[in-house]
Image (cartoon, rainbow, N blue to C red):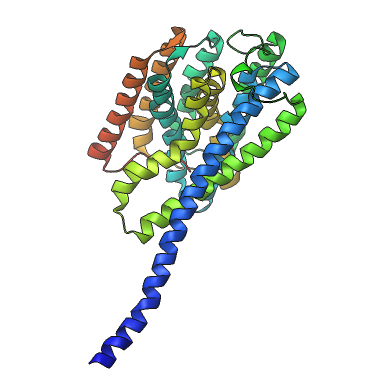
Amino acid sequence: MAVVDRWRNASIRPAIVGRGTRQLSSILLFVVGAALLIYSAEKLISYLVGAAAGLRVSVFLLAIIFTGIEFDDVAFGVALNMEDLSGVALGTVFGTAISMIGVVLALAAIISPTRVAVPGRYLALFAVAPLVLIPFLVFGPLTPLHGVLLLLLFAFFLGYVAMRELRRGTPATGTPPLVVPMPFDRARPLPGWAAIGLAVVALVGLVVGAAMTSIGTEGLLEEFRIQGALFGATIATLVLTLEDVLLTVEPTRRGAADIGLANVVGSVVFGVTGKLGIILLVGGSIVVDDEVLSWHLPVLVGMTALAACFLSTGRLRRWHGYVLLAAYVAYWVVSFAVFGEAPVEAD
């Protein structure tokens, strides 16, 4: 019997050691990815502000280009659609846009209430952006042709903002560019184009950090056998929105609210136009479920309009954040209770 026990222990030990190694790898991947994510977000903020000062262009415009266009989200949505998960791909469009308002903007308001001065025309485009989806969603499946039209709409939005900001020569808040970097000045300022190059490097680090953190999250879920719905509704949701939270809350807290607001406005507009357009062009047609028209789209339209209304007051207040966060929680509760599933998140 002792011989048998020793044999059993010897055969089980490698499995235990192997599992322990995988668990440690998942933890390390998660921690390193999160650290890289935070560090890259911090550097991206600083480089964008420095580039705006050096090139004497609007930090709002640069932030829309660098943070509003979410390359990792696009890659994820395209992969889903190409794997015949078109419903999930469409869900990421709505899930990301709604969480940008109900989580990211809400936390920015709660943690760092501040004065804002986003031009009314930008807010109007932000508020009506989800409405452009109505004719596309109502009349049949979404096709690559719709994708072309949606990309053109985003190009119009980006071109309009660029034209106004370059003509203005100042940030959206009306503050001279050379004043904006003051909270970030810790060393000799870099030339504008050098700052742009470093911002690109920081953006790559941001994407890599987000990917590492997501892979680590999946490993933690598998290796520790955590219940999927519980983990997805808590830790994973926090991780998947961490990137945008950092790019909105941190600059707002440090006196460069333009970057945070551009991230929210740009991400929502890009999500319902450019992101969906690229998904359709690369992955093919998407059949629209009834729940999209009856639930997810109305929620997105309502929350976007509410956020635009709050921003139009000229001050992002703490109670604004609580209202938006409560609306997002209600969205989750109804999604679970009525449709029996969690709203799809990005990444």
Vertical placement of residue 111 versus 229, above or below: above
Q: How many marks?
A: 0
Q: Residue 88 at what x, y percent from top left? A: 43, 45
Residue at image x 61%, y 25%? 63
Q: Which quadrant of the structure image shows residue 2?
A: bottom left
Res 43 → quadrant: top right
Task: Indicate the quadrant containing the N terminus: top left, top right, bottom left or bottom right.
Answer: bottom left
Q: Residue at x 32, y 59 (%)?
A: 225
Q: Residue furthest front?
A: 187
Query: Residue 283 at what x, y percent from top left?
Result: 56, 47
Look at the picture and state if 273 lies above or below 143. above
Above or below residue 179? Residue 288 is: below
Apparent side of residue 330 relative to residue 112 in the rendered image (left or right): left
Residue 93 rendering spot, x and y as whole percentages: 47, 36
Relative to 46, residue 313 above or below: above
Between residue 185 and residue 177, name the one nearer to us. Answer: 185
Between 225 and 33, the one lying in front of the other is 33
Q: Where residue 76 sits in the image (x, y, percent)?
A: 52, 46
Residue 203 visible to the viewer: yes
Can residue 277 be seen at all in this image of the molecule? no
Q: Is residue 72 left or right of residue 166?
A: left
Q: Residue at x 58, y 30 (%)?
A: 67
Q: Is residue 303 left or right of residue 1?
A: right
Q: Which of the 4 quarters of the picture holds residue 330?
A: top left
